[in-house]
Amino acid sequence: MSDTNSLLEARGIGKAFLGITALEGVDFTLERGEIHALLGENGAGKSTLIKILTGVYSRDHGTMRLDGAEVTPSSVAEAQGLGIGTVYQEVNLLENLTVAENLFLGRQPRRFGLIDRREMRRRSKALLERYGLDIDVDALLSSYSVAIRQLVAIARAVDLSGKVLVLDEPTASLDGHEVEMLFTVLRRLREEGLGIIIITHFLNQVYAVADRVTVLRNGRLVGTRKLAELPRLELISMMLGRELQHITREHQAQEETIASTAEAPIRFSGYGKRGSVAPFDLDIRPGEVVGVAGLLGSGRTETAFLLFGIDRADSGTATVDNQQVALSSPEAAIASGFGFCPEERKTDGIIGDFSVADNIALAVQARQGWAKPISSREKAALAENFIKSLDIRPADPNRQMKFLSGGNQQKAILARWLATEPRLLILDEPTRGIDIGAHAEILKMIEKLCAEGMSLVVISSELEELTAIAHRVIVLSDRKHIAELKGDRVTADNIMQAIAAPAHTEAA
Amino acid sequence: MIHTRNLPFVTTLGIFVIAYALCVLQFPNMLSTRVIGNLLTDNAFLGIAAVGMTFVILSGGIDLSIGSVIAFTSVFVAVLVGSLGIHPLVAFAAVLVVSTLFGSLMGAMIRYLGIPPFVVTLAGMFLARGAAYLISTESVPISHQMIDTIQGFYFRFPGGGRLTALALLMLLVFIVGAFIAGRTRFGANVYAIGGSQQSAELMGVPVGSTTVGIYALSGFLSGLAGIAYTLYTSSGYSLATVGVELDAIAAVVIGGTLLTGGVGLVAGTFIGILIQGLIQTYIVFDGTLSSWWTKIVIGILLFVFIVLQRGIIWYSNRRLAESRLKEI
């Protein structure tokens, strides 16, 4: 790897949003004729890095060199002009235009000042033929499948930029055959000397197509490695930030007692939804914390959505106290005594303009129906009670929710569900984006809740967190529940091994 | 095969042809060139304004100021020419500059201050109407040799119909408008912004200048429509053309342009104007119907078209889902 071969070189890239660091000191080098995978969990900083490289964000620190010359693209168009083209996963091309119009938007061939449609059609055909596509370029883009739209986007980006191609989750909605078609194109572009950056969370695909990988975690660089020399297990440990080592578990004794109690009151059997999560069995006993582990996109959040009735299952049954229940909506799930704190707290969880007291009272109000409003006295009592017991700060029930810190918002959401006295509480990434102090408090609270007999399902990408609090861990990969670890088998090592080798780790 | 993209236009065309045929069955005289010539002349100012509105709606916006700008323009021209004795051509040029600047200003506010078009152009509507009152609250008559010449000019059709200067101006605006929409980069950018402003921006479309350009064009055409209206009525009146923007929106939507933007044709708007004119003409021929029937029929047609548009979106989504299912 000589320096002369490097195409795009970023050094010490840093970026903060409103004082919160999103990226710090990240080095990234893309070489000519390589496919470079960029990996990391949610919030690792992948998309921030990509947006800096492609001119969407400006960087706060660091330098960026393209072909040895320092560049600072300040817009997508400028980055395109420099040679850096991007294909986004969803926001992509314009479905209301034809294929040809999409390919040549902003650079249409003209004759006498007017767009020369015939020439545009001819060039579009020629361009797409290089990608093995023989389609009607005058048809609307929306009449083609996602895979073909993806290829059209790539054709446009490469034709426009020609040095660096950035692909953000290009395979998320493609099937196996389409992925292979896409990879063939990528390999050909690599032969032509293009540098390709690909963001994906499918490890199989990373190994299938990429030459090198850069892993980010919590806004920092974990490392850049050649994939040929990097065992899968090591890659996963880089992503999850966990050294392979054996740790002993603390609450084995408690685990024994839970295992010995009889029938689980909440059972899901053969529960699943096509295209979301494969059917799984799950029993949840009182006072038990069930952890859910897996990489981004493995079906973690989808599992939570199924359990809480946000997505409707198309197979299997759910029983609560030996009675079958239909979890067809969150309302039905709440009626069965379930609660759910979503991952995207800001968008799915809180109502920022409401006061803390109103936010806490929301779920109780929903459960008793809108016809019977909670009196302001009751609401105040509820708020005061939880602000005290959860130590929400500032201890002002009338403060608007959006002015609270992340940790305190999370506590208020917890309070909302605790006020309904649920028997099962589902927490999706309960400690994401909150400071260390609040983090420890929330973990302590989880332990206290299950000591009181509440059942919890905790989804987390923090393995330390899971192994510290969970009695049992379900491991997901490729939208399947692939393993269940119990008792002293709940270790970070075992979880990573289960993720790495799906076929071999059916836990006993 | 008809692309789904052109389905609304083809439907409009079909409705117009059928409606016209039915009218002719009842009143054979409606087939005459005289009727067609009058229809074009009577709706010239509305047609010119509707071309501007087509661009605005194609980009996913709305312009409520059109009717007020027409009134302002007509009063402004009438006062300049009728009271101050300025040459009509100078007055026309001045008023077109003013209305174009007015439109650009609204476009700039929409783009750079991030205020929704509905709000900005509503403010523009009040502002232009107020300015018209300020100039004169009375109807200002206008007479000038050149204006008389323009009013007297026409081509004679076989059959006695007259293709007047106003009708010619409208047809010219439609033809140029269709070229701008279909054959220029500006036009392509308008469709792109209407499809998805975010995607358009990521694809390098100059969203800012295009947005300003769209509202400037609409302002310019409103000014031109105002001039046409002044020539049509030989006067300027600040209370005139209230609600014309809504007629223009109706013509655009009936012409098959999606209110959500990104899909539609300038030619469709022309058919939309013809349909509105046809209904008016029918009422005149019938003689017993109240002129409010025009509004009622337009209302029904709008409902039909909005439902039709929903249906097309639903249908194409379903077809897409089916084709994806097949691939899996």
Image (spheres, coloured by chain):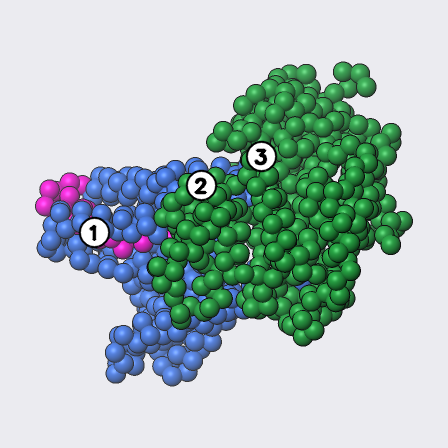
Chain colours: A green, B blue
Report the Cα–Cα distance between label 1 and label 2.
Answer: 54 Å
Q: Nearer the viewer, residue A368 or B48?
A: A368
Residue A217: % across, % down: 67, 33
Q: Is residue A480 visible?
A: no
Asked if residue B67 is among those painted magenta in the image, a careful observer would answer: yes
For the residues tagged 3 and 1, is the chain the same?
A: no
Residue B25: % across, % down: 41, 82
Q: Is residue A224 visible?
A: yes
- Chain ID at mark 3: A
Say what amino acid the circle numbered 2 marks. Arg
- Chain ID at mark 2: A
Asked if residue B304 is among those painted magenta in the image, a careful observer would answer: no
Kindly identify which residue carries mark 3: A436
Viewer-nearest of discs 1 and 2: 2
On screen, residue A414 above or below A406: below
Residues drawn in magenta: B60-87
- Chain ID at mark 1: B
User: Which residue is rendered at x = 31% and y = 66% of the image?
Assistant: B38
Kindly identify which residue carries mark 2: A393
Residue B262: % across, % down: 51, 53
Report the Cα–Cα distance between label 3 and label 1.
Answer: 60 Å
Give me the disc on residue B221: none
Q: Nearer the viewer, residue B246 or A43?
A: A43
On screen, residue B53 above or below A80: below
Badge 2 element:
loop
**CB within 8 Å, label 3 to label 1:** no
Viewer-nearest of discs 3 and 1: 3
Residue B52: % across, % down: 38, 51
For the residues tagged 1 and 2, is the chain the same?
A: no
Kindly identify which residue carries mark 1: B129
Say what amino acid the circle numbered 1 marks. Arg
